[in-house]
Amino acid sequence: MGRRRSSPVNKMFAWVRRQSMKVKTFLGFTTVLCSLLALKLLVRDYDHFFIASEAIHVAGIAVLIYKLITQKTCSGLSLKSQELTAIFLAVRLYCSFVMEGDIHTVLDFVTLIATIWVIYMIRFKLKSTYIAELDNLAIYYLIIPSAIVAVLIHPYTHHAYISRLLWAFCVYMESVSVLPQLRLMQNAKMVEPFTAHYVFALGVARFLGCAHWIIQVYDSAGKYLFLVGSGYFWLPMALLAEVVQTFILADFCYYYIKSFMNGQLLMTLPPV
């Protein structure tokens, strides 16, 4: 049963909708700044941002697995987004083994296995419920530009050249991998709960990743972006990739929170 239309939450969203675009932008910017300030004060080890981001991604995949097992349908899920996710996770896992080998490697491995299982279910077990005509964003539009940018802008470290190229590719690929899922939901107009939970988890994960970069840049007065030996353009480009993905998901997260606060089971997206 939905919440009453006279509830404070509904009044708040109604008030926000009536404001001009400048006011909405200011409110959004203020909310982000307050969130970043809270994270900076509460979190001491900034590496925990990435660990939390990857853990939330795992939780999002777990929601999809629950949906596929219990509801026996993959309706509303983008196979292309899952395939892109598997690609960048596989590349990042290889790079992690070669360059790091820590808790991030374990989390990436778990997420990759879970993503491959989701792909298997969509392609074979639940193929009849997959709506291919709505999942119509060609993935080569995302893979090819990511590869080109990776060749042009990548880190300069002591690791092998191919490892540095692959690391850059997975960073760029991750920033746009959710686009097919968002395109499918926009085509469908309606988003069922489990898919919405999954995409919202991606939004939270990306915000934490972006927060890590922004706080590091702030603490170093901008010097973090141009660390010696990293490549002059690499770190700014990596931050840009995080910001791009965060903004891609920001609009969806707004409507998700709005629907959740209103007690709605299904999300209705606005027209393009």
Image (spheres, rainbow, N blue to C red):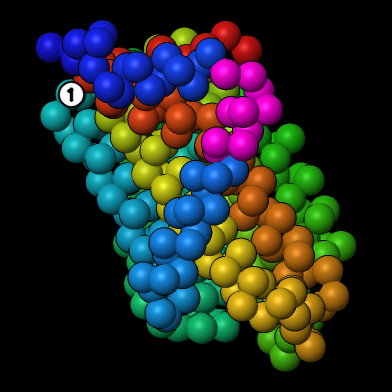
Query: If the image is split into quadrants, where does the C terminus sit?
Result: top right
Query: Which residues are drawn in magenta?
Result: 19-28
Q: Is residue 134 magenta?
A: no
Look at the picture and state if 246 lies above or below 155.
Answer: above
Q: Is residue 242 visible?
A: yes
In the shown orientation, is residue 169 left or right of residue 253?
right
- Residue 271: where, in percent of width, then height? 57, 9
Query: If the image is split into quadrants, where does the N terminus sit?
Result: top left
Rendering quarter of residue 153: bottom right
* Element class at badge 1: helix
In the shown orientation, is residue 115 left or right of residue 68?
right
Look at the picture and state if 67 lies above or below 97.
Answer: above
Which residue is found at the position 61% from the left and 64% from the top? 214
Question: As rendered, which of 39 and 171 lies closer to the eye?
Answer: 39
Q: Is residue 25 magenta?
A: yes
- Residue 217: where, in percent of width, then height? 66, 72
Rendering quarter of residue 142: top right
- Residue 184: where, in percent of width, then height? 51, 21
Which residue corresponds to mark 1?
A: 71
In the shown orientation, is residue 40 left or right of residue 169?
left
The kind of residue tagged 1 is Gln
Which residue is found at the position 78% from the left and 78% from the top? 226
**Magenta region, main secondary structure:** helix
Which residue is found at the position 77% from the left and 69% from the top? 234
Crowd around label 1: few <14 · some 14–19 · many ≥20 (10 Å): few
Question: As rendered, which of 19 and 133 lies closer to the eye?
Answer: 19
Rendering quarter of residue 170: bottom right
Which residue is found at the position 55% from the left and 36% from the top? 27
Look at the picture and state if 45 lies above or below 145.
Answer: below
